[in-house]
Image (cartoon, helix red, strand yellow):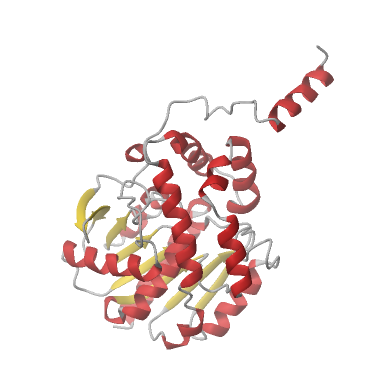
Amino acid sequence: MGSRSGALLGVALTLLGCVTGKYEAMDTLQFDQLSRPGLMGEAEIAGHKTVVYQAGLGDPVLFLHGLGEHAGYWNANLPDILAAEHQVIVPDLMGHGRSAKPPGEHYGMTAQARRLVALLDHLGVEKPVTVVGHSMGGQIALTLALAWPERVKALVLLAPAGIETFTKGEARWLKQVSTVAAFKARDEQQLREHYKKNVFGKWTKDAEHHLEERVRVKRAADFDAYLHAVVASIHGMLDEHVADRLASLQIPVTVVFGAQDGLIPNPILHGDDPESVADKARRLLPRAKVVVLPGLGHMLQVEDPAAINGLILEALAAAGAAE
């Protein structure tokens, strides 16, 4: 077979879904085998298992990962924060990572925030925390600060959901297309294309690692439960919007977007660039520090941990000085 006909056959097989990717050919990865910051403990919160990493002394910093992620997405960020003598608290949110993935009404933003308050109580964290939230974790952080202002000292929001808003029709469409079947159908090649086009502005070995995890965990025993949690979380983000309440926040807020973010704003419905959402953040949070970093995508903390760690440490120092 000539090189040209072989290449055409390869394209045809790929289109037909007949080519197995290198990670699809590897052993299944279970959720308890995902990367993690270190030894993680377990707590029963509202009757369900929550897995959390806690380390360090000093002022507490709560890290909240985004939709479909887990605590391991903060691995490159925690050493610098610990070195600056802070306590870090890094849970797998309900429905994600090693935490429980029950069916039902557990994935609203208020439900997640309430569970975090209970987790802080369980861990004996009485001082107000600085919350660093990525994507969905950003919207949960905003919900937490609005509903329990006495528990939050400052916010650092990385590519946060909750700033961009959707009409009722747009929200209805997003719910219709965000299904377990649609997410489950993505093969390795489709995931790679999606990650490179929409998720990561800079492709690094850590980006490749998270792609590998996502492909290999697809055959895990509780993968379907995880996808149900992801879909329910999308509904929660759309149903519990916070943008119209942000002016009431009285705490220091830092908001960071990547200029190459392919997820925020929604590329299909709004089709603008992240600077437009950053401008909206400046209007909704006039006292906030809002930064757009060139060359970075949605996964800011993974793509350039040094830059993000610098902004987090700056926010922590400013919050400490304001006390």
Location of the N terminus (image quadrant) = top right
The residue lying toward the viewer, choosing from 18 and 72, is 18
Left or right of 152? Residue 203 is right
Give how far across and how far down residue 286 sits, in percent. 52, 86
Quadrant the C terminus occupies: bottom left
The residue shown at (34%, 59%) is 81
- What residue lies at 78% left-to-right and 19% top-to-bottom? 6
Q: Is residue 39 left or right of residue 322?
A: left
How far across and down, in percent of the image, does residue 105 sit?
36, 62
Up the image or down, 43 lies above or below 185; here it is below
Is residue 58 among the parts visible in the rendering?
no
| Above or below, comparing residue 64 to residue 196 in the picture | below
Corner quadrant of residue 236:
bottom left
In-image side of 55 versus 132 (left or right): left
Compared with 98, 55 (above or below) is below
User: Residue 220 placed where, x, y %?
Assistant: 40, 36
Q: Nearer the viewer, residue 271 or 196?
A: 271
Q: Is residue 27 above or below residue 148?
A: above
